Image (cartoon, rainbow, N blue to C red):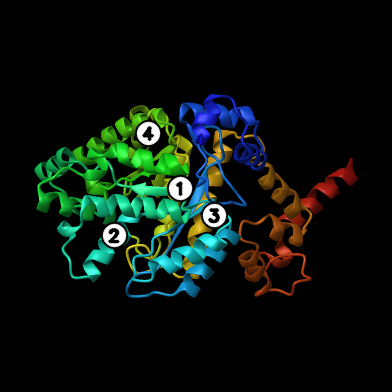
Amino acid sequence: METLIEAARLGKETETVRRTAKLEGVPVEQILMGLADGTIVIPHNRTRSIQRPVAIGRGMTVKTNANIGSSADRESTEEELEKLKVAVACGASTVMDLSTGPSWRSILSSILERCPVPLGTVPLYQIFGEAMRQDREVADVTEEEIFSAVEDHCRMGVDYLTLHCGVTRRALDLLKGQGRKLGIVSRGGSLLAEWMEKNGLENPLYQHFHRLIEILHEYDVTFSLGDGLRPGCLADASDQAQIEELISLGELQRRSHGAGVQVMIEGPGHVPIHKIEENIRMQKSLCNGAPFYVLGPIVTDIAPGYDHITSAIGGALAAWYGADFLCYVTPAEHLRLPDADDVRTGVISARIAAHAADIARGLPGSRRPDDLMAEARSEFDWDAQYELAMDPVTARRERNEALPSDSDVCSMCGHLCALKTSKRAFERNREKQ
């Protein structure tokens, strides 16, 4: 059966493409062209129905992802389903289930049944996590187990997979030779590094990439080529290991796309503001314009509890320079497993960054909600302001906690409201004329 790329190359308008184009508000031809040249992806496992498919990449609005998932220390299907509900209600474009506890399969199955947007996972978490719960060493996991885990996730219906294929022996040698303040901060990247070092072998996901292509092609699942060597602090940004990994991902992108399998590239990480643009330009150049999926980037290391802000700053800049997909960061980053409130804050923060970049990019209609908000504020139409707000619940609560809901002003200015004052001033000027 043809994948979306293969159909696009033949000019075929599949139902998935037609629905996605309608939701995106763009011509079908634009989606087909992007799929065909690898600058757009539509994560969509052919075995699963998605209510809200999305197109990620060139000419599209910047998309946002929300990571949910349990850990062995805190595991609850109900909590993860609540996080899913909140993420979708707050406007996340996609969701990733990063569960690592023993009940990961039942949690993932429950999420897949209820998730109306594309869903991603990281199969390495499960295969290595299960091995360690069986008191096996990371190095004891076989290559067959790794590839079986990838196919297992595809079979379950997952739409895109983070696979750390660029963590090569050469990249690890560069990392060790140059040195890092914070080593490897990617869970998948660190697990593969341990497996490679102890077995003295190349990364099987890189060495046998053709096997991954065959598996993902069968289900039309999208590669999200993971940044297993991303910098985890500003001091490590743009070092040799990170760049070497990106070079490898560019090579793999060409192979994957050539074989008719969609692919996007994951990026850093912790990056100071002045290095964000060069990171985006480098990725676009080395990876043939493939969609770029960035975590943050986080622009300072010293704001635990506020990393939804540090990442929104970096995300807005990254998207302005050309990133296509922002992975949210919550206030719990670096501290604990996020809860539903953290998910809400993280999604809204990432959407603010994405929307700000859409406006700067000049995407048609992107500023329309802002113009409507200005009109609603001018008319003191509070209901319209709540409706236009990214987070209507919070906006309504914050105002109504301070003043009765029928008040036409807020408690900041009260009777000294600047809008009312300026209207009175201009009305008097008109009367004099």
**SS at circle 4:** helix
State the mark number for residue 326. 1
Q: Earlier in the sequence, mark 4 or mark 1?
A: 4
Give the spatial CA distance, label 4 vs label 1: 22 Å
Q: Residue at x 56, y 53 (%)?
A: 117
Type of amino acid under label 1 = Leu
Q: Residue under circle 2?
A: 127
Q: Residue under circle 3?
A: 92
Residue 69, position as x, y percentages in the image: 42, 65
Q: Give the label, 4 or 1, closer to the camera.
A: 4
Between 374 and 232, the residue placed more toward the observer is 232
Residue 102, position as x, y percentages in the image: 34, 71
The answer to whether residue 198 is above or below residue 291 is below
Give the spatial CA distance, label 4 vs label 2: 23 Å
Give the spatial CA distance, label 2 vs label 1: 26 Å
Mark 1 burial class by Cα count in 10 Å: few <14, some 14-19, many 20+: many
Type of amino acid under label 3 = Ala
